[in-house]
Image (cartoon, rainbow, N blue to C red):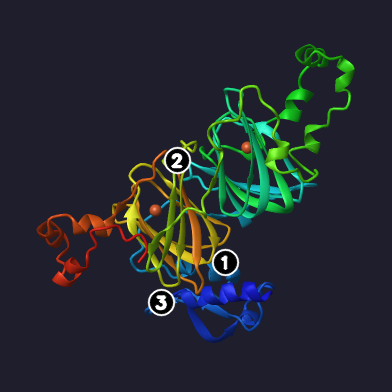
Amino acid sequence: MDTKRRKIIQSLAAAGAAAAIPGQTIASLPSADGFLTSADTVPQPIEDGLGATDPGPRNVTLDLLNPDMLTPPPTDAGDMPNLKFSFSNVPMRLTDGGWARQVTQVDLPIATSIAGVNMRLKPGAIRELHWHPVAEWAYMLVGTAQVTCLDTEGRNFVGNVGVGDLWYFPTGYPHSIQALNEGCEFLLAFDSGKFSENDTFLLSDWFTHTPKGVLAKNFGVPQSDFQNLPSPSQRYIYPGRVPGPPSVMRVSDPYGSSPQSFTYRMLAQSPIQTPKGTVRIVDSRSFHISKTIAAVLQDIEPGGVREMHWHPNADEWQYYIEGNGRMTVFGAEGRARTYDYQAGDVGYAPTNMGHYIENTGDTTLRFLALFKTAHFAEVSLAQWMAVTPPELVQGDLNLPQEVMNALPKKKPFIV
Ligand SMILES: [Fe+2]
Ligand SMILES: [Fe+2]
């Protein structure tokens, strides 16, 4: 096991409440997990005198990554929908230009509002010209790319994006993505949980399924000009040459360039600073074309907590970029469930369900929260209590004056 992986698992094991049995190691399990070494201790479903050892078949790696499943906080209760799914649990679609994988409503049934795709392009590789019946929002994770788009007024766009930059293509707008020198990896979010990346309208697919005589009439050239069309199976993501800068690549357009930018520098936006981390909110008020996806990039320092809150207007679809964290979602009627998240995981908090996110590791926890809405909205529990008549708050909760005095009248975001 590499050092980084070991560190993650050790920190998770340390953060988790699961009890380890002295002397019991991986090697003593009936089915040893080759991913771990014999020196790793085995967490057990035991806490506060409850539970018992698990001597039978088990997946210790998953147990270590999900300590709040093995020994849930005693405050967890009731049945909740599954609110976690990892990109590591879905198949890669491998091509000669890179790869793609997706987490949709098929994988995470509660996630009706957004579907996510994780895509990698080798240097110069091209995500074929295409469009789709949903809008596309993206965050660049690694490397750089050049994107193109055409709006419905016939105005074109070419722009470059790097780490922390976004793009947004409205429903039906045709576009492409091409990696620059170092290649790239990005997260795509579509504003429908049912959308599959395999269901896009591909340029090569349409040409292949149009009579050549019609193609000849449509473009005013002989049919023989269409003898060498590639199979759509050879496109989708395919190798290419690194393009020049946008100023060189942009084609003269009699209608001009699109007046709205399809890209946005999220990391360049000044964050909301808090003692325990930073928050960047980007929605249609700042990234004007992004009418159906609002995004919040959150960096929580070790020990910090994204305060207890909820969102009145949209479900929250999360993508964990780095670090370790946990979220408890309160579902009303006495229901609550806690999930642990690592890089590459998807989390979900349905509309109006209260939640917090806690950094449980020893490094910064960075994650994206995406919402299918034009305007990001949230209600802060602490701020609500601070500006409500204190008699009502104390009547509900019987809180000492010390708590009342500590309530912040401005949203603290991360505490
Ligand atoms: Fe697309
Ligand atoms: Fe939230």
According to the picture, the residue beneath numbered tag 1 turns out to be 62
Image point 39% across, 45% down: which residue? 376
Looking at the rendered structure, the secondary structure element under dot 3 is strand
Expressed as whole percent of the image width and height from the top left, the position of residue 278 reads 43, 61
According to the picture, the residue beneath numbered tag 2 turns out to be 372
Q: Residues within 10 Å of mark 2 (few under 14, many from 20)?
A: many
The answer to which of marks 3 and 2 sits earlier in the sequence is: 3
- Kindly check if marks 1 and 3 are in contact, taking CB atoms under 8 A apart as contact: no
Looking at the rendered structure, the secondary structure element under dot 1 is helix
The answer to which of marks 1 and 3 sits earlier in the sequence is: 3
Tell us which disc is closer to us: 1 or 3: 1
Looking at the rendered structure, the secondary structure element under dot 2 is loop
Tell us which disc is closer to us: 3 or 2: 2
Image point 65% across, 40% down: which residue? 147
Expressed as whole percent of the image width and height from the top left, the position of residue 9 reads 57, 73
Outermost bottom residue: 23
Q: Residues within 10 Å of mark 3 (few under 14, many from 20)?
A: some
Q: Looking at the rendering, which quadrant does residue 40 occupy?
A: bottom right
User: Is 226 left or right of 160, judged from the image as shown?
Assistant: right
